[in-house]
Amino acid sequence: MMTLPGVPQVVIDRLPVYARTLAMLKSKGRQVISSQELGDELGVTPAQIRKDLSYFGRFGKQGRGYNVQRLGTELRRILGLEQEWTMVLVGVGNLGRAILSYRGFAPEGFKIVAAFDMHSEKIGTTVGGMKVHSVKSLPQYLKSSPADIGIIAVSAASAQDVANVLVDHGVKGILNYAPVALRVSEGTRLKNIEPVLALQSMTYYLKGVVP
Amino acid sequence: MMTLPGVPQVVIDRLPVYARTLAMLKSKGRQVISSQELGDELGVTPAQIRKDLSYFGRFGKQGRGYNVQRLGTELRRILGLEQEWTMVLVGVGNLGRAILSYRGFAPEGFKIVAAFDMHSEKIGTTVGGMKVHSVKSLPQYLKSSPADIGIIAVSAASAQDVANVLVDHGVKGILNYAPVALRVSEGTRLKNIEPVLALQSMTYYLKGVVP
């Protein structure tokens, strides 16, 4: 399955949620689900689900619903989730420690293979079973062990420099936890983990309901 | 400024990024910016920016660009960012500690006012200058000190129970870090901080470019 041109980013962003919900339904023994029921599970309209899926082909028969296992498997294939993805972590403060101990990555095929920090007191220590390397050794590391994804958990002031090193050494995906808008070259996928941005769009709705 | 019906969620989600970029431009002394330049800064098309802003009125004069300060101020007003928002944190593990030490909240008007945990060895300790209370006291706390937003940083297994308590006691916004799809009542705004979901939509694009 190729990357199809013209599929909106927002559609791609919804597919993992669909895949996760289907996996949950499958674990409960569910075999078939209607777009109405799936929409109820997800909090979206059935029309939205049908439209999103229509970019990738036909998955259900009119009036018969979706085969839970088949649709889930197909979505995982479309999203590229049937392979393992390697990640390097840069920044081993509280946040980096939380990321290293986060147990949600590995079961989904995302593997942190190395951790880096700029602070000499952290270099050489072991955090979450992983040795912390000097960020100065990051270019050399990536030359010998290319990684798919870089996780940035450094301060806002250092994040752009780290991003540049990652991109210059072949990392094509960046998950950024630093509170700063990074600039990356075209061809690099950037996702920001942004609690403040999430809060700031939430308050648009809250300001009407909270006294 | 009210909450306008019919503005798509994805538009609301983009406004904080616009506001942040405008603040950055203002700090650099920039007074006016065209939608083309603003789009270049943001990695979106100028047409997208004009369309997003058109939901809220007219902000620029044709061919004259946007007044950086005025547009930034107006977006902050639309988003409800001119007031302080109170937040309670539930879960003080590594992630909760990182959240308590995160310095990005306060400057943006988001204030963590209390922290709760279910593990007896943590209750009564002080983390990031904040005393950790028993999660059993959360209902009573919220009755006497209503909070706008609840941050959930507990395990996936406990997250729904915590969400129920928050919602039942008047919390209207939830920022969920637990790797689980929560169900909340209508009228509650839920945002998931989801590194795996972010990664899973990234790999759609990476699978074509990474060997």
Image (cartoon, coloured by chain):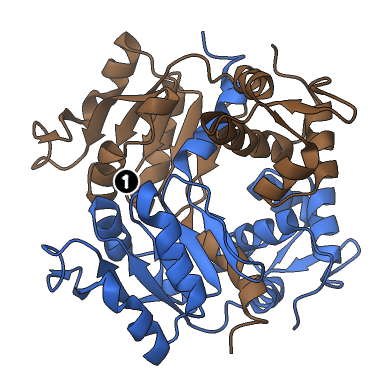
Chain colours: A brown, B blue
Report the chain holding disc 1.
A
Which percent across, then down, holds residue B95? 29, 53
Which one is in front, A66 or A122?
A66
Residue occupying the point 29% across, 65% down: B100
* Residue tagged 1: A154
Q: Quadrant of residue A87?
A: top left
Q: In which quarter of the image is residue B22?
A: bottom right
Query: In the rendered view, does B53 fall on the left or right side of A103?
Result: right
Which one is in front, B4 or B177?
B177
Residue occupying the point 23% across, 24% down: A137
Which percent across, then down, holds residue B28? 54, 63
Is residue B122 at least partly visible in the picture?
A: yes
Which percent across, then down, holds residue B60? 83, 68
Tell me the crowding category of disc 1: few under 14, some 14 to 19, or many 20 or more residues within 10 angstroms, Cα based: many
* Residue lying at the far front of the rendered structure: A29
Query: In the rendered view, does A13 fall on the left or right side of A28?
Result: right
**On screen, B109 above or below A64?**
below
Which one is in front, B61 or B184?
B184
Q: How many marks?
A: 1
Residue occupying the point 28% across, 73% down: B136
Look at label 1 and name its amino acid.
Answer: Val
Query: In the rendered view, does B140 fall on the left or right side of B32?
Result: left
Q: Quadrant of residue A184?
A: top right
Residue occupying the point 78% across, 29% down: A53
Which percent across, then down, holds residue A105? 38, 32
Query: In the rendered view, does B69 fall on the left or right side of A56?
Result: left
**On screen, B22 above or below B42?**
below
Quadrant that contains the N terminus of chain B: bottom right
Q: What element carries label 1?
A: loop
**On screen, B200 above or below A208?**
above
Which one is in front, B154 or A129?
B154
Is residue B29 at least partly visible in the picture?
A: no
